[in-house]
């Protein structure tokens, strides 16, 4: 499975289409133009790295943030989506592996992600790919 990191805005259409499908999966209204504009902004501002698997089979967005205690970075998997017809074929695993390899090569301290507690299949995948729950961490959120 080929995974590529979007480094040019010419590849944005396939990524925006997948990201819009992901949003719709979670109940958002279709908004392909808005998703494309948002994605362009994220890539241009270097706030996100975007990875595509196969022929637009899956997408993964990552935020790279500073980690002052280690004077390195932490990579946060923000969105991971595989289109339904491509599921159970190793697409998500390929995306996670590619991201982990790039994070490791860049000297990152940690690769983290979060998912809903009832997303059992995702949790099983993440466990199989080396992630572990951190019971000593509490995730808190404040909607602005």
Image: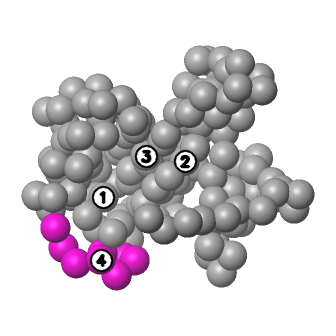
Cβ–Cβ below 8 Å for labels 4 and 2?
Answer: no
Label of residue 28 in the image: 4
Spatial distance from mark 1 to mark 4, Cα to Cα?
A: 11 Å
Tell me the quarter of the image containing the N terminus. Answer: top left
What residue sits right under mark 2 in the picture?
77
What residue sits right under mark 1 in the picture?
19
Which SS type dominates the magenta stretch?
loop
> Is 78 located above or below residue 121 in the figure?
above
Asked if residue 72 shows in the view, the reply is: yes
Label of residue 61 in the image: 3
* Outermost residue, left side: 33
Q: Nearer the viewer, residue 110 or 12?
A: 110
Q: Earlier in the sequence, mark 1 or mark 2?
A: 1
Cβ–Cβ below 8 Å for labels 3 and 1?
Answer: yes
Q: Of discs 1 and 4, which sits in the foreground?
A: 4
Q: Earlier in the sequence, mark 4 or mark 2?
A: 4
Tell me the quarter of the image containing the C terminus. Answer: bottom left
């Amino acid at each position: 499975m080929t995974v590529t990191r979007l480094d040019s805005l010419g590849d944005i259409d396939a990524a925006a289409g997948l990201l819009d499908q992901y949003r719709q999966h979670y109940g958002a209204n279709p908004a392909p133009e808005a998703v494309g504009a948002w994605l362009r902004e994220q890539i241009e501002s270097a706030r996100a790295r975007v990875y595509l698997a196969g022929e637009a089979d899956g997408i993964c967005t990552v935020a790279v943030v500073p980690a002052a205690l280690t004077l390195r970075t932490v990579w946060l998997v923000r969105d991971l989506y595989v289109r339904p017809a491509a599921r159970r074929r190793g697409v998500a695993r390929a995306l996670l592996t590619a991201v982990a390899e790039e994070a490791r090569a860049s000297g990152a301290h940690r690769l983290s992600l979060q998912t809903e507690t009832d997303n059992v299949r995702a949790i099983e995948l993440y466990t199989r790919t080396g992630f572990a729950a951190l019971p000593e961490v509490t995730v808190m959120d404040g909607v602005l």
